[in-house]
Amino acid sequence: MAVIEALDVHKTYRRFRKPPKAALAGIDLVVEEGGVHGFLGPNGSGKTTLLRCLLGLARADSGDMRILNAAVPKRLPAVIGTVGALLESPAFFPPYSGRSNLTLLATSQRISHQRVDDVLELVGLTDAATDKVKGYSLGMRQRLAIAAALLKAPQVLILDEPSNGLDPAGMKEVRELLRQLGNTGTTVLVSSHLLGEVQQICDDVTIVSHGRLVTSGAVRDVLAARSTGDVRVEVADLTTAQRVLFDAGITSEILDAGLVARAVADPSTVTKALAEANLYLSALTPIQADLEQAFLELTSDEPAIEGDVA
Amino acid sequence: MSLQLDTTEWTPGAVTPSPSYPALVRSEVVRIYRRRLLRVVAVLLLGGVALVLGIAFLQSSKDIVIPPGLQERLEKRQEQALERWNRCAEGDFDGDPGATIEDYCGPEPVGADAPQLDWFIDDPRFLAVDNMPSVFLGVAGVMATVAFIIGASVGGAEWSSRSMTLQLLWEPRRLRLLSAKWLALIAVMIALALVMLAFALALAALTTQLRGSWDSATSDFWSEQFWVAMRGGLLISLAATVGLGIATALRNTGAALGAGFVYFAVAEFGVRFILAKYGPEPYLVSGNSAALLLPEGLEVPGKTVEVDEGGRSTYEMAESVLLTHGRAAVTLSLYTAVAAAAAVWSFQRRDVG
């Protein structure tokens, strides 16, 4: 079941004495229930704009948007209690403590104060709970924002760059937390520039560029679709092996990393050709496309949207 | 930091937010109440009230000191007044057969109509009937100004801190959120005004008791003060609404305060000067605010009209317009409605984030 659906969403910003800027040009996003869904795109590709439209913060010009099958923005109030969100930089009242900021939110929705302490503990802010937010580091504010998003124990968690401002250890912990949330049945939609992070924790991914969907699907499927079929061949005599492969109709290159056979449809053909020439492999490793490579290839040749000045 | 989720306890949707309008208003009241500006202003106001009434206390006395020789001078004045009246009464009034002596000479200066001792000495007592109205008017006037400032601060701070974005992620119904903020602001401002009034009245009552008199403070007098307080509450509510409205529409506290300053310091003077002929005074905020508070309303100059003196000459004169409580309330409410409508319109339509 799709938990988040955005179909053919358009959004154009009209600007004073400047041409209008199309932020979304018929973008699609479908997030299935449970797991972690990555949302990728270059700067200005419309990720945050779409998230803002989904959360009722910005008004889409057209398109169909749904969260938990409730039409957005009209029926958003009916489901907002089950949606936690963190958008860009966290926004809290600087003169209030971290606990006060969360307590105010909890009070407005009659959520117990014990729950506030629980989420503060979860993000490791118990010791700083009574300190004023204006004294928090960016990383601490980010943790507080994650705590705010988790306060409702949401069924759907929408996070825009949740690792912003966190140190490497903090980023790792956030990754683990999101993965755990995804495993418990929470649907996590995470927008990030950190492609390695997304590849590590996401089950599915949507890649957008210039306000349009580029590709979407399970991470392994997206990577497989970009796979070149290259394999790394580990053998004692690289030069002889390259000649044998050439004779067998397989193109290869000797690189620093060793011998790489190009566009091999069936790796057993490599094994067979080398074995027949009495060359025995110590390893044969398919070279996987990583998400960064796939992302760069997918987003590099996208034409700009008409009216897009970014 | 642990960030370790206890997966045995974590169930998506286990916490059920239960949004209710009173809870939303209550959280907004707490949000405003915790503002440092509000606390600083409250302390300054309490200090100011204590200072003013402390000075009044020190300058008041129950003992009326009659300077030496004043009694003799008073008796001489009374004699002189009676002599003047007698001379006047002996005059010729034939030209006006219906006229009485009092029409020409005034009442005979005897008894209560004779010159009195209190005409010649300053009464040092703190008289409730003279000073209590100033307490009511002063608290209402100052609190209306404070309400505008706090309203602008509350509205602008939400945008400058971007906490409005966070709040909308919890309550996406914008009109509901804005109205909760408005109600909370009015509640806090009225509560603060009541505290100020109670504090000022307590000090004034103490001063009256120890250094003055409650003479003439009848039930009618207190009834009049009660209605001044009620109208003051209305003015405070309107001022807070305008402050919140402008700050919400402009998304900035400074811009809202600047707009208020420019209006009172520049625009009203400019309008009075440039449009004097058209009598703008009945439509200006300051005059209507004063009219709303003052017990009898306020007379202000209206349009300039030409007065014909029996065909011999003409001259121009401004009509006098009485701003009644009702008229002032309607005028100010209309202006407030415009500011509120601008705030609602912009808040409903604009993208946030």
Image (cartoon, rainbow, N blue to C red):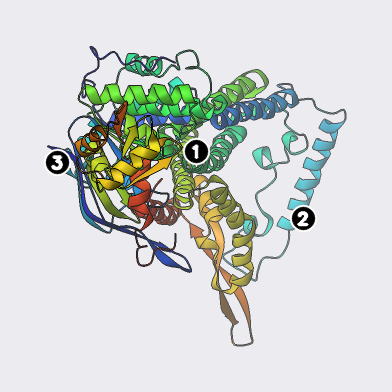
Residue B157 in view: yes
Please give the residue where the numbered disc 3 appears in the rendered image. A69
User: Residue reaching furthest front?
Assistant: A277
Q: Quadrant of the C terminus of chain A?
A: bottom left
Mark number displayed over residue B255: none
Q: Amino acid at mark 1?
A: Ser
Is residue B28 left or right of B203 when viewed as pictured?
A: left
- Residues packed near mark 1 inside 10 Å, few (<14), some (14 to 19) or many (20 plus): some
Q: Nearer the viewer, mark 2 or mark 3?
A: 3
Q: Nearer the viewer, mark 1 or mark 2?
A: 1
Name the element at disc 3: loop
Residue A41 in view: no
Chain under callout 1? B
Please give the residue where the numbered disc 2 appears in the rendered image. B87
Image point (31%, 48%), residue name: A251
**Disc 2 with disc 3 on a shared chain:** no
C-alpha distance separating marks 2 and 3: 101 Å
Q: Of residues B233 and B137, which is closer to you in this image? A: B233
Q: Of residues B201 and B338, which is closer to you in this image? A: B338
Q: Quadrant of the N terminus of chain A?
A: top left
**Disc 3 with disc 1 on a shared chain:** no
Q: Amino acid at mark 3?
A: Asn
Please give the residue where the numbered disc 1 appears in the rendered image. B161
